[in-house]
Amino acid sequence: HEHLAAHNIELEQKVERRTQKLAEALAQSRVAEQRTLASEHRFRTLVETMVDPVWSLDPDTLSFVYVSPSITQFNGWLPDNAAQQPMGRHMLPADDARLSAVVRERAKAFRAGELDQSCVFVDEMQQLRRDGTLIDVETRSSFVVDVQTQELRLQGISRDITKRLQLQRELKESVRQL
């Protein structure tokens, strides 16, 4: 009996230690989950409140897979209308042809290991706003591989540079007249 009682106490102590370790691991997991959720919230808030739209493009289909809500202020289109649309839908045909070829060439070079994620591309184009006006746009983008799907994405940010280009033209004209 004594031997069984001692063995029983020993087993109960092991169960208690293991239960304590599991409780600590669970608490750590909950803290990590809360940190992850807070980080995701901060990131989403950052992306969704930026003035310049942020986007993600599938370089194989040349269709957007994500467009931030600021696209509405930028060009008048709703994010859901802009996402899942071809890249060139709101571009002038010449810009669409040029940039479609450039994106495909860059994607091929990235896949071949000639480019990496540190390469940042700067491109300019004109885009048609929903109200029919044209704006001059500068994009900065780079390739990333989606960690969940392993799919290649071109992620970037677009900026309306219409006023900047107009001021540059006016400055050149003023200098020319001097």
Image (cartoon, rainbow, N blue to C red):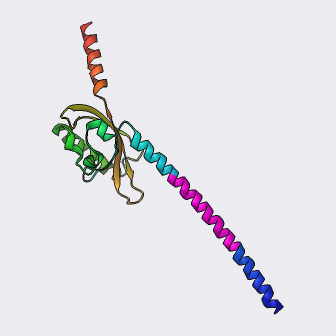
Residue drawn 18% across the image and 34% down it: 132
Judge whether 125 appears above or below 1 on screen. above
Q: Give the quarter of the image for residue 150.
A: bottom left
Residue drawn 47% across the image and 51% down it: 40
Q: Which residue lies furthest to the top in this view?
A: 178
Magenta segment: 17-37
Residue drawn 29% across the image and 25% down it: 163
Q: Which residue lies furthest to the left in this view?
A: 93
Q: Residue furthest bottom?
A: 1
Counting from the top left corner in percent of width and height, residue 118 is at 42, 44
Q: Magenta stretch: residue 49 in it? A: no
Q: Magenta stretch: residue 29 in it? A: yes
Q: Quadrant of the N terminus?
A: bottom right
Q: Give the quarter of the image for residue 147.
A: bottom left
Magenta span: helix, strand or loop, mainly?
helix
Foreground residue among 32 and 110: 32
Judge whether 81 appears above or below 7 on screen. above
Foreground residue among 46 and 126: 46
